[in-house]
Amino acid sequence: MTTSRTFTMIKPDAYAAGHSGAIIQIIEANGFKISAMKLSQLTGSRAGQFYDVHKSRPFYNELVAYMSEGPIVAMILEKENAVEDFRKLIGATNPSEAAEGTIRKLFATSISANAIHGSDSDENAALESAFFFSQLEQF
Ligand code: CMP
């Protein structure tokens, strides 16, 4: 299998609670290599753009407000089978349904403040990576 990439964000709740270091340690211990990393804060408008796919959902406004309330840590990660393996490592969207040992089980506090994002496909991983990192910064 060849190396592939995924995109992740440590969300504002986990950053504010001081969990970034612990989360990064878990990510690296599970074989993911960090190929880009940036501390950033989304404006409401940028958060709205990032979650445009959820525009018609009832939780969209809450999601945009939450994702722009404080700093996030954006990262591009490399590993064989990166997208699928990372989704397993972070666990289910709702932390009450997340498996033991997953990042969301350990650090998420609710379905909206769920600590971390992970791309759901190779295509979205590329789009989301480009949203935060220019080509120059990636290589
Ligand atoms: P994620 O799967 O990373 O991307 C979409 C986000 O929307 C999800 O994490 C949650 O933060 C949020 N979300 C999904 N479902 C709900 C919900 N029912 N109520 C509030 N927020 C949600």
Image: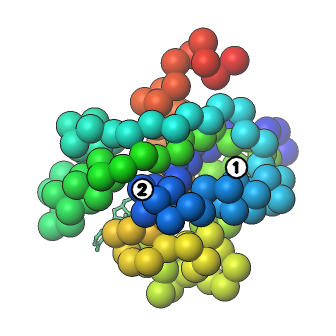
How far from the left and from the top, in percent, is residue 28? 79, 53
State the residue in front, 12 or 137: 12
- Choose top left, top right, bottom left or bottom right for residue 2: top right
Instruction: Indicate yes or no: mark 1 CB to ligand 1 under 8 Å.
Output: no
The answer to whether marks 2 and 1 mark residues whose Cβ atoms lie closer than 8 Å is no
- Choose top left, top right, bottom left or bottom right for residue 4: top right
Q: Residue at x 56, y 73 (%)?
A: 107
Q: Residue at x 26, y 38 (%)?
A: 43
Q: From the viewer's perspective, is 120 left or right of 33?
A: left
Q: Which mark is residue 82?
A: 1
- Dot placed on the residue nearer the N-terminal end, 2 or 1: 2
Number of numbered discs overlaid on the protein picture: 2
Q: Please state which amino acid type lies under the numbered disc 1.
A: Ala
- Choose top left, top right, bottom left or bottom right for residue 91: bottom right
Would residue 35 be seen by someone viewing this image from the given angle?
yes
Report the colour scheme.
Answer: rainbow
Q: Please state which amino acid type lies under the numbered disc 2.
A: Pro
Regarding ligand 1, which quadrant of the image does it lie in?
Answer: bottom left
Q: Residue at x 36, y 50 (%)?
A: 70
How far from the left and from the top, in percent, is residue 18? 56, 61
> Which residue has dot 2 on it?
12
Q: Which image quarter holds the C terminus?
A: top right
Q: Which mark is residue 138?
A: none
| Gap in angstroms between the C-alphas marked 2 and 1 | 23 Å
State the residue in front, 5 or 23: 23
**Helix, strand or loop status at disc 2:** helix
How far from the left and from the top, in percent, is residue 74? 53, 41
How far from the left and from the top, in percent, is residue 115? 49, 64
